[in-house]
Image: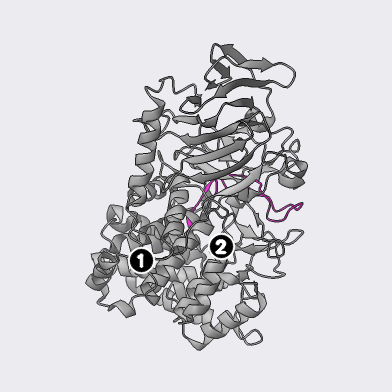
Amino acid sequence: MFHVKGEGISVASQPEGGFWPLEDYGLIGNRHAAALVNSAGSIDWLCWPRFDSPSLFAGILDPGRGGNWVTRPTYDFSSRHRYLKDTNILETIFECSQGKVALLDFMDMTWSEQDVEGGPPGKLIRIVRGLEGAVEMTSICRPRPNYARDAPAIELNGNEAEIGPFVITGPQGWLKDETDMSLSQTFVVRPGEQFYFTLANDLDKSPLASISAALQSTLNYWRNWAETCTYRGPYRDMVVRSALVLQLMTYAPSGAIVAAPTTSLPEEVGGERNWDYRFTWVRDGSLTLFSLLLAGYHDFVESYASWIYNTVNPDDIKILYPITPDGQTTEEILDHLSGYRNSRPVRIGNGAADQLQLDVVGEALGAARFAWRAGLWKPPEEGRRIRDVLEWLIERRHEPDSGIWEVRGGLRHFVYGKAMIWYALDAAIEIFEGLKLEGDVERWREERDAIREEILTKGWSNRLNAFKQSYEDDLLDAANLMLPIIGFIDGKDPRMLSTLDATMKDLVVDGLCYRYIDAPEGLRGKEATFILCTFWLVSALILADRIEEAREIYENLLAKASPLGLFAEEIDPATGEQIGNFPQAFSHIGVIHAAVTFAYFANVGEVDLEEWEAAARTYRGRAREEIRPMSV
């Protein structure tokens, strides 16, 4: 059994420069907002009341200016933290010469308007419990609203303090430091005693009837949801943790799924590859839905499908959207923040919103086909939206685009993007034939087959003996590992096997896979290995029947997760440290997909797929071994 590491150890001394390793952070949230908490009890990132709201604490991007909220012993201490099993409740244990104390951090899941847009976003709750001895604790809140661009307006009222639109409570009265505009209180906790703090938006005026009841209700919520996972096998701990992370990244009122809850955590320390990921990429959201369906989680389908329907204009498809209609994607640089480990610029908004990336239709329709086969979704309006989207796609299929990696070095005819156009058409054909919907299926079939021939001709490199990144560039791209996964080509086809070998030789270092090397990006600097690409490599190896090789790479990568089982976007192979926005939905998608691929194609673990198989046989009559990998 492969287990999540479970606990991280740290000491209270501030790390050099004040920047904690990403691996030291845990994520808490309530499907409206999320916060990063380190093992020294400091909340260093919180955008409230939504994922894309301006930050209240941004110490992770600038320890001096960004703001934080730390609760810890006043003495030197050591600490370790873990998630309560199968939850998103974070427990930190402090040990010092005076005794031992537990800190529980979570956002409550007890309020009735959780899924209502504009409803109160719940509360962030911090519970301090005495375990041994009499320990003096301190709680210091340094609010820095609007990405530290605004001075906090603080008003005291007994054990409450108003910070503009926010209200923070504690077990006793707050002290206000006018010099640095911070709040603090100190208290002693003994065995059996419990003190609590809350942070809420002023939309939420209702007091909690019982902190213990809120904790128990939240614990039950997460555990009941986690238990619906149908995957069983040696990687279940990591699959469930990844599913819990992906659930945290879903904005409940709209069904949108953010790519990550953070902005500007760099892909290269000290470099400029710093992006805001607090938006919904159609690609990332669709692959998240797909992976959660693979693991047995059905509840995302209706909400995400509704978000797609209400948000995406089939006449002008964007690659990313804000999580609500009033959200902003305009890219802006915050010059006053130093950036994580002095990596500038710090950006909010994302200019990639204006890029053309034709592959996104493929990911969306691939997930739709899977949900339809499972009996969880049918296209509304007799498929009118799908017909409109396909018209948009066919009109543009000969155009170059910016590709899955959103390069800013010029448009290309990317092989992966073309293959995903093929995938979109293939999915639509099956849905329309299966439901006997009205559509130009024969035309779609002709376009699909023509695209396949084009890719096999223009997308192949005799020099590389592999599929190449784009028609224009004779370079390898790990995105092409997806070709057998989407069923474009058999995993054992000689062309795919040689592509796999070339990728292993030139893009893989110590079992970690780069997206590409020396591609025309239009950016300075270099990036590290891409975690999702390594998981794609695992799945491609499984489909090539190279099971032991796949298992070695998979378990090597799982061992590089943070002590809490979290993944950022990338891993530096030289240092082993995680970099990029954290945690990253893409990476946790890969954890689940590879585990289920092991179970389904290599009998390493088990997963309940009878309903998927029944749906596939109903419309296509294929036996188990004939079903396309991503169309299980």
Per the image, the residue denoted by label 2 is: 559
Alpha-carbon distance for marks 1 and 2? 39 Å
**From which residue to which does the magenta span run?**
260-283
Above or below 143: residue 382: below
Above or below 472: residue 2: above
Amino acid type at circle 1 is Ala
Q: Where's residue 518, x and y in %? A: 72, 69
Look at the numbered disc 2 and give the secondary structure of its residue. Answer: loop
Q: Is residue 344 visible?
A: no
Above or below 456: residue 531: above
Q: Where's residue 336, x and y in %? A: 75, 35
Labelled disc at residue 43: none
Per the image, the residue denoted by label 1 is: 428
Amino acid type at circle 2 is Ala
Residue 512 position by quadrant: bottom right
Q: Viewed as shown, does residue 70 lie left or right of 339? A: left
Q: Where's residue 190, x and y in %? A: 52, 26
Q: Is residue 368 visible?
A: yes
- Towards the viewer: 578 or 365: 578
Residue at 69% across / 20% down in the picture? 181
Q: Badge 1: few (under 14), some or many (20 or more) residues near its Cα, within 10 Å? A: many
